[in-house]
Image: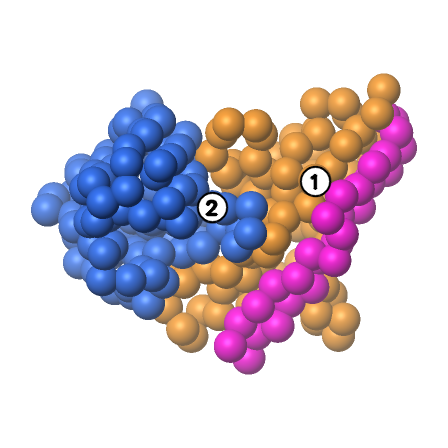
Amino acid sequence: DAGVIQSPRHEVTEMGQEVTLRCKPISGHDYLFWYRQTMMRGLELLIYFNNNVPIDDSGMPEDRFSAKMPNASFSTLKIQPSEPRDSAVYFCASSPGQGAVDTQYFGPGTRLTVL
Amino acid sequence: AQSVAQPEDQVNVAEGNPLTVKCTYSVSGNPYLFWYVQYPNRGLQFLLKYITGDNLVKGSYGFEAEFNKSQTSFHLKKPSALVSDSALYFCAVRDPTGGFKTIFGAGTRLFVKA
């Protein structure tokens, strides 16, 4: 299995632009998580899905952030408009669900820089 | 509310010596506890977890952790450190009665010197 796939690996954009981060979870995993990692705040859970349905989005910082999971093999995290304080590494993780729901498999991350 | 604390920003140990990375937690019920490791420019990798049962949990790469309910701790240990163990280690906790939201600690950087 290729593991969790994230794209792009690096994104540099200018303030005010729309940014879309993409994630392909491991096939068969029922749970998908989006995290943000910064030096100041550490690793923060933004949102997670179960069977493509958003379950907890309490970590989404503002209305500028939105996440979707149109099918079991694809999710997006969108920031519109982007701001310099959004600069961070964004991780996607997936989990098998029943019996092993708490073992999360992380993707390599997308390093976002907003100028 | 659940929380997890890693009191040391950095731990230094000589290769071959035992290592301990500390973690304490706060959760209302019985916790699910985890350790993850992050190597430079990589995502987190699962090491081990405690759900129930034996307080000593064994995981990947020779690591183990001991659940201590009275001290609300879940320290990560390894009998003999390797230089390749140098990385960032995260402790995490989940309250199983509150959904699947997992809270991660700030991380502890481990340096193993040859």
In percent of width and height, residue A93 lies at 36, 43
Residue A23: in sight, yes or no?
no
Which residue: 10% across, 46% down?
A70
Residue A13 in view in this figure? yes
Q: Which residue is rendered at x = 77% and y = 39% of the image?
A: B78
Residue B88 percent coordinates (x, y): 64, 38
Label 1–label 2 contact, CB within 8 A: no
**Image point 83% across, 37% down: which residue?**
B12
A24 vs A17, nearest the viewer: A17
Residues in magenta? B1-30
Query: Which quadrant of the view contains residue A113?
Result: top left
Q: Along the line of sight, which residue is nearer the eye, A18 or B60?
A: A18
Which chain gets the orange colouring? B
Judging depth in this view, the residue of B21 and A65 nearest the camera is A65
Colour blue belongs to chain: A
Mark 2 Cα within 10 Å, few/some/many (few <14, many 20+)? some
> Residue drawn at (27%, 29%), measured in percent from left and top?
A7
Q: Secondary structure at mark 1?
A: strand
The subunit letter for the residue under badge 1 reads B
Q: Amino acid at mark 2?
A: Gln
Instruction: Tell me the subunit letter for badge 2.
Output: A
Label 1 packing within 10 angstroms: few (<14), some (14-19), many (20+): some
- Residue type highlighted by circle 1: Arg
Quarter holding residue B82: top right
Q: Position of residue A66 (x, y in %)?
A: 20, 54
Q: Which residue is mark 2?
A: A37
Q: Quadrant of residue A26?
A: top left
**B68 horizontally vs B49: left or right:** right
**Mark 2: secondary structure:** strand
Position of residue B96 in the picture relative to residue B107 (left or right): left
- x then y, percent, for residue A27: 24, 35
What residue would you read off at disc 1? B109
